[in-house]
Image (cartoon, rainbow, N blue to C red):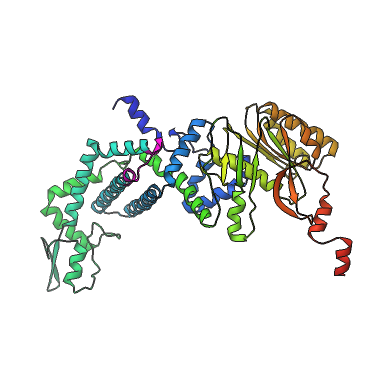
Amino acid sequence: MNEENKNTTEEFSILSRIAASFEDAESEAYHQDLNLLQLIEKMAAKWGKDIRKYFYVMPTDRQVQEFRRAVYRDVKKEAVYQALLSYRSGLEGVFDIRKEKENVSDPMQRAVWRVREEGAYWNLYEELAKNLAEAGTESEGMREFLSILQGILQSDEYLKAKEQTDGILKEIKGIRFLLTYDRDRISVSLGEVGGAGAYEEWLERATGGERMQMKNPFFAEVPVTELERACLDVLEKKKPEFFKALSKVADWDEEYTKPVLRRFEKEILYYLAYATFQRDMEKAGFVFATPDTTEGKRMEAKGLYDLALAAASLSTGRKVIANEFYFGEGERFFVLTGPNQGGKTTFARSLGQLVYFCKMGLDVPAASASVPFFPGIQTHFSVEESVQTGRGKLMEELVRLAPMMKDRRNGSFVVINELFTTAANYDAQIMGKRVLKHFNELGCMGIYVTHLKELTDACDGVVSLKAMLDEHGIQTFEIRRGEAEDIASAANQMNKYRLNYEQLKERL
């Protein structure tokens, strides 16, 4: 293997092919605005807080996005998913051995735990290589990882270490002691007692099925006792070559694992966490789709829903409404109007989540979807005034909006929710139209939720959507194309809660 190929192998990442740093990753504003943090924390609760960083960093490169999507298609396959779950469970067992080893003070006992740790680790990767090969992975990422793993397992370095490790473990398992008690003295001798088999099995046979409180001292999970130490002293005199080999193990470099495998151990949790979460949601009746990202296709989706709201509904029982949408030729921005509590913000979030999960290379919360490539996501949701800064709500919104307006990246997906609600309508219209024109000129697409119907004609490419009411004026939470209307929110709430004059009169 030449140096270039060796470096490429060592730097391989299942998330992006070439390793990237996630150590300083922090959540962005859009994670909070789109309620993505709720979902990330839900997965982190099961898979560990370290996975959060992988969901904080969104790929800006189309190739990385598609690389992940192909890997995720493999991970979703039952055989691959089960192989990875088994691998992860086995890895937890290795970590347990490693933890126990740290509690052992006797050098010889510690050396054996070190051998056990390495033996369990490599057996685990041999099983993973076998299972992945049988499962038939198709993605570039999984096939390359399997090739790297097989190369490691077939290397002279590995085969030599494995032979040494297996030899030590085999010899340890074959050790037999005979303890003879006579006149307050215990004699310890070495030899084959009771035939082959595990030491504990022999003890069980020799004591009529009653387990004695002694185990092979090498495998004991407690410190070596005085008697066990005496047994080891006998062994050291009888088998000096074995103890020399064991002493060498005690001096081995602790870092027997490969960097590429250590990276895989952590990064594969990104896919497993989402795949497990998706399976749980699908069992509850929610659908997911692999988005079509073919270049040139229009953006559209059917059965789109807010995934964070859906996850919360499992405990609250709240009904989740799915919607559909499309951007036609030349259309770039939705301006969504309608009554309060009509599902506008939820729909806006679902659009942002659609783009986010697509960019992350994962399945999206929809029955079907086509999503073009966006280099990034920008969001701005209505904020409250800050007690710390003393700024009012409008000023807080402008402070957060400023860096978005200065960002000259072309083509981002933009989600804006209820800006300038404390400004006079005339001022809010002027500022709102300026914001829409700015992002439109940068080639962005997105949605602007507002109570101002005048923004629907802010510039070319703007499409009017509205939150629908039923024939009784009650919210349906459905979003449809349609001309913006002057909807009195107070009247809407009055109808919803039966508070008009006649209804109040009936109650009184």
Q: What residue sits 18% from the left and 73% below the top?
A: 207
Q: Is residue 225 magenta?
A: no
40 vs 29, left or right, is: left
Residue 463: % across, % down:
72, 36
Residue 254: % across, % down:
31, 43
Number of disc labels = 0
Residue 237: % across, % down:
12, 53
- The correct choice, above or below, for 502 with respect to 330 in the image is below
Q: Nearer the viewer, residue 283 or 265?
A: 283
Magenta part mainly helix, strand or loop? helix
Evaluate whether residue 57 shows in this view.
no
For the magenta stretch, what is the residue range?
131-142
Q: Nearer the viewer, residue 273 or 484?
A: 484
If the image is split into quadrants, where does the N terminus sit?
top left
314 vs 85, left or right, is: right
Residue 354: % across, % down:
59, 42
- The correct choice, above or below, for 92 with respect to 147 in the image is below
If the image is split into quadrants, where does the C terminus sit?
bottom right
78 vs 118, left or right, is: right
Q: Nearer the viewer, residue 121 or 332?
A: 332
Q: Nearer the viewer, residue 457 or 131?
A: 457
